[in-house]
Image (cartoon, rainbow, N blue to C red):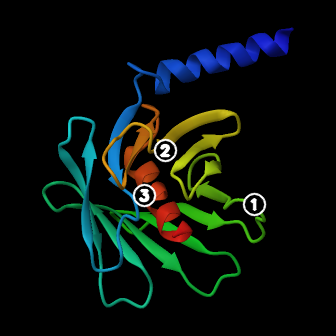
Amino acid sequence: MRRRQERRQERKDDRQTFGRGGDATRYQMREKLVSIGDDFWIENEQGQKVFKVDGKALRIRKTLKFEDTHGNTLAQIQERKLRVKDSMEVEDANGQRVALVKKAIISPIRDRFTVKIKDGPDLDVKGNILDHEYTIGEGRDKVAEISKKWFRIRDSYGVQIDSEQDDIVILAVTVCIDQMAH
């Protein structure tokens, strides 16, 4: 009985953050975001351009830069070569690693990812990655939800981020997952 009440409370808390009128921050992203050399914008829920992802061309490994609307670099994503598992690293503006996104070696049914956060708990990515219907969470606690159901615009999907999370890191992780899954 107690376990059922705990789960009910967890779902209620989840709706307060990620449900309609919840306090999660919402962004709109394009499906198959970027090929190297392309640039794209991430928009907020009002449709305003808030972050630019700059795909750097002519590099040996995939490199993407997150910039604000003034062109200031906020983060950088780089593919890590010569590893057993596919992985991409997220660095802050100073070049310090803040997250490492790793793809599971063996995943027979669905893609699985783990996110190693520098000064925080590891995050797990669960759901249907290819269809952009998944969550990023810490254990049972959801920190972000990614879904196509919020937009009628073709080739777009939404990212909702818990207000206590670093938006840049979660958006960068989402870009990494998109790059690695496609």
Report the mark closest to the observer, 1 or 3: 1
Q: Report how far apart the C-alphas of labels 3 and 2 lie in the structure.
A: 13 Å
Q: Residue furthest left?
A: 70
Answer with mark 2 or mark 1, whichever residue precedes in sequence. 1
Q: Is residue 131 left or right of residue 112?
A: left
Tell me which amino acid carries mark 1. Ile
Residue appearing at x 70%, y 39% in the figure: 139
| Whether label 1 touches label 3, CB < 8 Å | no
Horizontal and vertical percent for residue 171?
41, 52
Q: Is residue 7 above or below residue 179?
A: above
Residue appearing at x 64%, y 59% in the figure: 113
Residue labelled with disc 2: 146
Residue appearing at x 58%, y 43% in the figure: 135
Question: In the drawing, what numbered circle is on residue 109?
Answer: 1
| Whether label 3 touches label 2, CB < 8 Å | no
* Callout 2 secondary element: strand
> Could you classify mark 3 by the number of other residues whose Cα lies within 10 Å: few (under 14), some (14-19), or many (20 or more)?
many
Viewer-side residue, 178 vs 63: 178
Q: Is residue 21 left or right of residue 49?
A: right
* Callout 1 secondary element: loop
* Callout 3 secondary element: helix
Residue labelled with disc 3: 172
Tell me which amino acid carries mark 2. Ile
Q: Is residue 6 left or right of residue 166?
A: right
Viewer-side residue, 99 vs 9: 9
Horizontal and vertical percent for residue 99?
53, 59
Tell me which amino acid carries mark 3. Ala
